[in-house]
Amino acid sequence: MFAAKDNDMNATKNFILEKSFGLFLQKGYNGVSIRNIQEETCLSKGAIYHHFQGKEEIFAKAMDLFFFPALRSFHYSDDETNTPLKNALNEAIEHRKGHIDKLREMTDFKVDDFYFFKLAFQVEEFYPDFKSKVENTFSEEENEWREVLQMAVQKGEIRKNTDIDLTLSLLMLIPRGLGLSMAFSSGISTDSLKEIYEKFYRTLKE
């Protein structure tokens, strides 16, 4: 009985966070009130405050759940393959596509990279210890890419003389640079990212 009750509470909390994140994405931190969250969730003020202390906590928890994971290019765990880099690049594309699809499910408006980058400045201002959180997120991803590149060299997938540090920097920059560029032009697309990754991969094998 208690387990079922806990599951219901967690489901309600996640529902509030998901709806709130959509609002923050569209309107920014200052443009969202508890009343807006009430209207979006169809929950009473008391029900919302039963789970959260206020808008500040809702914002922080929503960013933990949806914003910071989207900053990462991928999560990789397959070390048995002979083509670790190719697999990782494909996984990175699927990872990004998954976040894009999730964002579109969560919002009633046409979401694109512009809203995500605009939200990033809000997170920097209102999220406690933002800089440390971002540094840790990027550091974890860098370590995973470095491991993938080292495996790719060891298994002969890419050239033995590959500059790991330079390649690592480029792998970190490609999705963010492309996302920023597309934020002010055509919007979200994994096709462009896939094309760039494929060309980049070929240069490492030649």
Image (cartoon, rainbow, N blue to C red):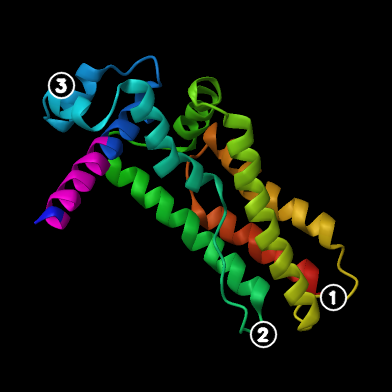
Left or right? Give the position of 90 relative to 201: left
| Above or below, 25 relative to 203 | above
Callout 2, which amino acid?
Asn
The amino acid type, in three-letter code, at marker 3 is Lys
* Mark 3 neighbour class, 10 Å CA radius: few under 14, some 14 to 19, many 20 or more: few
Q: Which residue is mark 2?
A: 82
- Of 139 and 74, nearer the camera is 139
In the image, the segment drawn in magenta is 3-16
The quadrant in which residue 23 appears is top left
Residue at 58% over, 55% down: 193
Magenta span main SS: helix
Q: Residues within 10 Å of mark 1 (few under 14, many from 20)?
A: some
**Residue 3 image offset from top left, x and y in percent:** 16, 56
Using the image, tell me which numbered label, if any, was put on residue 45: 3
Relative to residue 170, is residue 122 drawn left or right?
A: left
Q: Secondary structure at mark 1?
A: loop
Asked if residue 108 shows in the view, the reply is: no
- Residue 90, given in percent of the width and then of the height, sits at 55, 68
**CA–CA distance in space, label 1 to label 2:** 14 Å
Label 2 environment density (alpha carbons within 10 Å; few <14, some 14–19, many ≥20): some
Is residue 6 covered in magenta? yes
- Residue located 35% across and 15% down the image: 31
Residue at the disc numbered 1: 159
Image quadrant where residue 12 sits: top left
Residue 194 lies within the magenta run: no
**What amino acid is found at the position of numbered circle 1 in the picture?**
Arg
